[in-house]
Image (cartoon, rainbow, N blue to C red):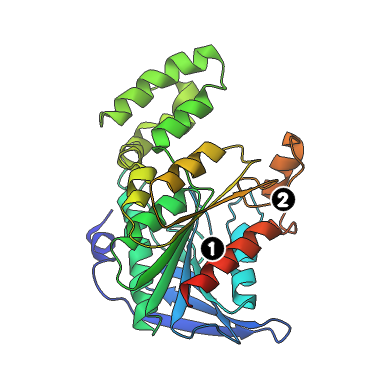
Amino acid sequence: MNRMLRSLWVFALLSSWVYAQDLSKNFTEKEWQMGPLGGMLTIAHQPISTDTAVLLIAGSGPTDRDGNQALMQNNSLRFLAEGWSEAGFSVLRYDKRGVGASASVSVNEAEIRFTDFVADAVAWGNELQAQGYTHLVLAGHSEGALIAALAAQQLSGVIGVLSLSGAGRPAAEVLRSQLMNQPKEVQELAFPVLDSLVQGKEVPEVSPWLWALFRPSVQPYLISWFAHDPAEIVGLIELPVFIAQGDQDLQVTMQDGERLAQTNDQAVWVPITGMNHVLKQVTEGDVQDNWKSYTDPVRPIHPELLKRSLEFLKSLRK
């Protein structure tokens, strides 16, 4: 990563706005460019509070503001943001580095670290406050839940945090449990590499079978990610924390959500029947329907999630 990118998040960045209004909706959309990063701010026409905004943070991988990737269009974060804005909350969601309106950011996989994504969230939070949103709510999906929890400790004016399908264990433990479903031969190759990365030691040579997961260029990022225990971090947040977890999640368990909730006295624990990892309502026990929802851009998010999260958001401004 060159010097410009290293210093990008330290200095105040200029913003540019593009307005787009749909009169059939109860909010106005604004394209927001902060330096090389781009996002979308949805501003409620009848805001519950004009000085409050929700910062919505996407999960792992090359994910855009809507919760989508190249081969995974489900619009989960778009539906969530629009639902919140329809109810009176302004919401900023943004494209991750190297994706969508943030595509101009050069991403060198070997140099990226988990803390870089936390720095991005903090930069967006500071920019929101510079625009008059002095009260912030940080909401993160999946890996974004951990980013939200860490960013909340670095920003002033945060009044609440939402964890949506967030892991309650270090990422290495989640990955280990997922690998337990693989053939024994794969486990025997993967576990020694995983153990080494947990100890902070890179593995220069990995089996071609593990290349997608443990290629040398991604190992520094994994080491930096594995170092964080989400439950410990949530336990340090001295704010109301909303923790939602679906019982049809194929990637994170109900026990993850429970572990997060147990660490914080101000936690609101919200188990949701029929919700999967991408926040959609799916048929119980139907794995095919579950995976199908990952690439269904029309299926709405689970109505219970929208209802309960709105109750939480409204409680923060009473």
Q: Secondary structure at mark 1?
A: loop
Q: In the rendered view, does 148 fall on the left or right side of 220?
A: right
Q: Residues within 10 Å of mark 1 (few under 14, many from 20)?
A: many
Q: Residue at x 70, y 60 (%)?
A: 303
For residue 253, say whether it is visible: no
Q: Looking at the picture, tell me which residue is in the foreground, 285 or 99.
A: 285
Q: Amino acid at mark 2?
A: Gln
Q: Earlier in the sequence, mark 2 or mark 1?
A: 1
Q: Looking at the picture, tell me which residue is in the foreground, 157 or 6.
A: 157
Q: Residue at x 73, y 44 (%)?
A: 292
Alpha carbon separation for disc pair 2 and 1: 21 Å
Q: Point out residue 136 in the picture as x, y percentages from the top left corner.
A: 41, 72
Q: Residue at x 61, y 41 (%)?
A: 249
Q: State the residue position of label 1.
A: 65
Rendered view: 317 above or below 188: below
Q: Residue at x 35, y 41 (%)?
A: 229
Q: State the residue position of label 2.
A: 281
For residue 207, say whether it is visible: yes
Q: Point out residue 231 in the picture as x, y percentages from the top left corner.
A: 38, 44
Q: Secondary structure at mark 2?
A: loop
Q: Point out residue 176 in the picture as x, y percentages from the top left corner.
A: 45, 27
Which numbered tag is attached to residue 106?
none
